[in-house]
Image (spheres, rainbow, N blue to C red):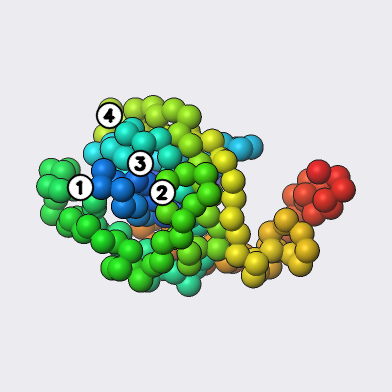
């Protein structure tokens, strides 16, 4: 007996980083969308988004975005804007859990920064800000969600999470915010390193 049993989990969020996606609204302002389905491969970021949200409407129209990665101390700001949407009227599927909010920046106490390569604003408080362009949008989950493939154009990072004098993240200083089973978590203790870590740690080898 293996000690397991078949379960019907309501969600499959075993643990993913939180991202704040900024996109361009029709009036030129930047919308902020908290998401918890994001991962990177090379210079591409894959994002999971609800199909009827303002972010997807903006991405289909403009095709540019910033993937802002918050640290764990920004959990209050993330949760403040989590139950809001830039869509007006609020899509039927989002009622009654969400409400329309035109100014998520003020609501979350966040500061917009001008980006270099895209129109969408960066979130100043996030230690990592990734400017990107949409490569493709694919419908999933029966059309209720989309998978967005975004090509990274450039990355901005706070000095406080970088190794001195290097374009390398100090993993002891970086404290990303994670999401698991609808709860927020900070990064736990360092328990080991992959065999390829020395290649990344030594700039001469990359």
- Secondary structure, mark 2, is loop
Residue density around tag 3, few if under 14, some if 14–19, many if 20 or more, within 10 Å:
many
Residue sitting nearer the eye, 99 or 13: 99
* Label 2, label 4: how far apart the Cα atoms are: 26 Å
Numbered disc 4: secondary structure: helix
Residue lying at 59% horizontally and 46% vertically, measured from the top left: 154
Distance between the Cα atoms at labels 3 and 4? Answer: 11 Å
Q: Which residue is mark 2?
A: 120
Q: Which residue is nearer to you in this view: 78 or 123?
A: 123
Residue at label 1? 87
The mark lying in front, picked from 2 and 4, is 2
Residue 106: x and y in percent read 30, 68
Residue 64 disc label: none
Residue 42 lies left or right of residue 79; in this view the side is: right
Q: Residue at x 57, y 41 (%)?
A: 153
Q: Are marks 1 and 2 in contact (CB under 8 Å)?
A: no
| Foreground: disc 3 or disc 2 | 2
Identify which residue is drawn at 60% across, 65% down: 158
Residue denoted by label 4 = 143
Element at label 3? strand
Disc 4 from disc 1: Cα separation: 18 Å
The residue that mark 3 highlights is 49
């Amino acid at each position: 007996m293996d000690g397991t049993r078949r379960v019907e989990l309501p969600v499959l969020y075993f643990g993913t980083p939180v991202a704040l996606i900024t996109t361009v609204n029709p009036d030129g302002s930047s919308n902020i969308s908290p998401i918890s389905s994001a991962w990177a491969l090379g210079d591409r970021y894959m994002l999971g988004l609800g199909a009827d949200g303002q972010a997807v409407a903006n991405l289909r129209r403009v095709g540019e975005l910033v993937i802002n990665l918050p640290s764990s101390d920004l959990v209050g700001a993330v949760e403040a804007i989590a139950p809001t949407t830039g869509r007006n009227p609020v899509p039927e599927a989002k009622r009654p859990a969400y409400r329309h909010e035109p100014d998520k920046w003020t609501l979350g106490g966040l500061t917009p920064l001008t980006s270099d390569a895209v129109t969408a604003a960066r979130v100043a408080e996030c230690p990592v800000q990734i400017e990107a362009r949409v490569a493709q949008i694919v419908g999933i989950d029966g059309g209720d969600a989309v998978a967005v493939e975004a090509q990274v154009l450039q990355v901005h990072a706070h000095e406080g999470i970088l190794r001195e004098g290097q374009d390398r993240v100090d993993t002891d200083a970086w404290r990303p915010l994670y999401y698991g089973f609808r709860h927020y978590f900070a990064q736990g203790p360092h328990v080991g390193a992959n065999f390829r870590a020395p290649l990344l740690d030594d700039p001469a080898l990359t």
